[in-house]
Amino acid sequence: MELRHLRYFVAVVEEQSFTKAAEKLFIAQPPLSRQIQNLESELGIQLFERGSRPLKTTEAGQFFYQHAVKLLSNAEEIKTMTKRVGLMEKTVTMGFVGSLLYGLLPKIVYMFRQQQPHLKIELVEMSTKDQIQALKEGRIDVGFGRLRISDPAIRRVLLREEPLLLAIHSSHHLSTQAAGVYLSEVEDENLFLYPIHPKPNFSTQVRQIFSEHGLDPKNLKEVREIQLALGLVAAGEGACIVPESARTIQLPNLNYIPILDDFAKSPIFLAMRNMDESEDIRSLFDCIYQVYDLEGFLYDRAII
Ligand code: BEZ
């Protein structure tokens, strides 16, 4: 006996006629009658009074009808609930490097939550390098980072190149150069780099920018995190190179000035598993570009 048999039987009882039930079920009457006969032979009882007009159920038929209706309604419930559970449990876990929290990450995640209310979105802070392993192990679904780390299993999409700024004390002579400074002008400054661990990280990237352009900063000091670096700058101990989005961190006497070298940029990448064709990731890209449009950022849209 299959659910189909119950559906046919219930229709015949409710319509009190094989002809009307067949119409309702969009099948021909002979196969419908055959299915009911098969059901009766399987149960070894008569479900309808023979020759009754309109059609009437036997006592056993009435009992069977009541339970068939319940079973069909349970089956319907299971179907809708399973669909809902499937939707409710869809989770997108995003790895991100801490510095992105000062920029657009909160805005992007908030908008994505609004646009995809059925998705559970989880955020996990981790270095770009750790994101690669986490993607491969399925612990995260996407990773936002700043480093060009390559791996054959991972697809990396450049979202944009974020300009770098110099954070400097308001009393420092470079603070008067509101239009900006070149990195060659800060080679002799005390420069705080962050973070210390894990390598490679943003401090590795800043060192590379200097070395790839023949610059030799004399006094580099690594500190644990951006807040510490900027606190020391505000205390007048030196300067620090930060992504533009760090401008949201404000302290007394802390000034930010543009860096004029066009290579002074920090890329922002989105990494995902090579084979991941998920619709959710496509929607996340759409959401990122919507935020860029709202903020007036220039970007080359990646084809995914
Ligand atoms: C951005 O600032 O461009 C950005 C930050 C986090 C995630 C995606 C993009």
Image (cartoon, rainbow, N blue to C red):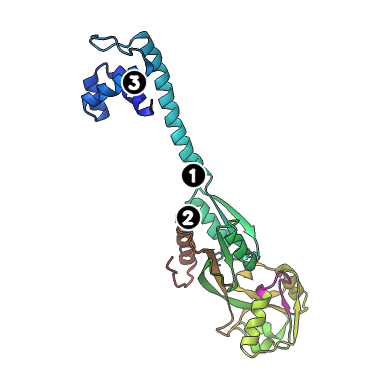
Q: Residues within 10 Å of mark 1 (few under 14, many from 20)?
A: some
Q: Nearer the viewer, mark 2 or mark 3?
A: 3
Q: Position of residue 87 (x, y in %)?
A: 49, 44
- Amino acid type indicated by mark 3: Leu
Lower position in the chain sequence, tag 2 or tag 3: 3
Left/right of residue 280 with respect to residue 98 in the rendered view: left
Q: Secondary structure at mark 1?
A: helix
For image coordinates 46% across by 40% down, the residue present is: 83
- Amino acid type indicated by mark 2: Asp
Q: Quadrant of the C terminus?
A: bottom left
Lower position in the chain sequence, tag 2 or tag 1: 1
**Circle 1 residue:** 87
Highlighted range, magenta: 192-202
Q: Nearer the viewer, residue 90 or 247?
A: 90
The image quarter in which residue 141 lies: bottom right
Q: Are marks 3 and 1 in contact (CB under 8 Å)?
A: no
Q: Position of residue 243 (x, y in %)?
A: 61, 73
For image coordinates 66% across by 84% down, the residue present is: 176
User: Is the distance from the Cβ of mark 3 to the nearest ligand 1 atom less than 8 Å?
Assistant: no
**Circle 2 residue:** 280
Asked if residue 94 shows in the view, the reply is yes
**Circle 3 residue:** 39
Q: Secondary structure at mark 3?
A: helix
Q: Position of residue 300 (x, y in %)?
A: 45, 73
Q: Secondary structure at mark 2?
A: helix
Q: Residues within 10 Å of mark 3 (few under 14, many from 20)?
A: some
User: Is the distance from the Cβ of mark 2 to the nearest ligand 1 atom less than 8 Å?
Assistant: no
Query: In whole angstroms, how far apart are the C-alphas of marks 3 and 1?
Result: 37 Å
- The answer to if 80 sits in the magenta stretch is no
- Amino acid type indicated by mark 1: Leu
Give the main secondary structure of the magenta stretch: loop
Q: Quadrant of the N terminus?
A: top left
